[in-house]
Amino acid sequence: MTTTVSRVAVTDAAAALLRQLTAQHGKLMFHQSGGCCDGSAPMCYPVGMFLTGPSDVKLGDLDVGLDDPIEVFISEAQFAYWKYTHLTIDVVPGRGAGFSVEGPTGMRFLIRSRMLDEAELDHFGLR
């Protein structure tokens, strides 16, 4: 049995919305905002609408039941603060972030976080 260790996950509710948004907008990706205009909301974009660069860290892939996983990135500076944290992308009713594709749906993505457990710390070489 293989156990997959990841820094990022998605709730069932968020995965369902992501499948709907993918049908509408095509392949999607996330960039975890570090503040600015929309606080620290996870921002969801059609692939190609937000360009990642060498100062972005790929946190992982979200399997939401589509052919392609949804990639999740964070800025290197923000990652330095959150490297001991596991992030789960969830969705709740409310006004979405201004630039994120869920904005018009009446829902908004948010991050739920917890500290990495002992096995995850070992896996990522943080102990």
Image (cartoon, grey):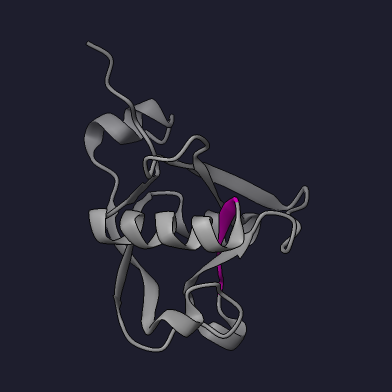
* Residue 39 versus residue 22 in the image, above or below: below
Q: Nearer the viewer, residue 98 or 122?
A: 98
Q: Residue at x 48, y 84 (%)?
A: 104
Q: Nearer the viewer, residue 71 or 103?
A: 103
Picture coordinates of residue 11 (x, y %)? Answer: 26, 55
Picture coordinates of residue 51 (x, y %)? Answer: 76, 58
Kindly report the secondary structure that dominates the magenta region of the rendered protein: strand
Picture coordinates of residue 6 (x, y %)? Answer: 38, 37
* Residue 60 versus residue 43 in the image, above or below: above
Q: Which residue lies furthest to the top in this view?
A: 1
Picture coordinates of residue 53 (x, y %)? Answer: 77, 52
Q: Residue at x 23, y 35 (%)?
A: 118
**Highlighted range, magenta:** 27-34
Tell me the quadrant of the picture where the C terminus can be found.
top left
Q: Is residue 77 left or right of residue 96?
A: right
Tell me the quadrant of the picture where the N terminus can be found.
top left
Q: Residue at x 55, y 72 (%)?
A: 101
Q: In this view, does 36 lie to the left or right of 9?
A: right
> Which corner quadrant of the image does residue 93 belong to?
bottom left
Is residue 32 shown in magenta? yes
Q: Is residue 112 left or right of residue 36?
A: left
Q: Which residue is drawn at 38% across and 49% down?
A: 84
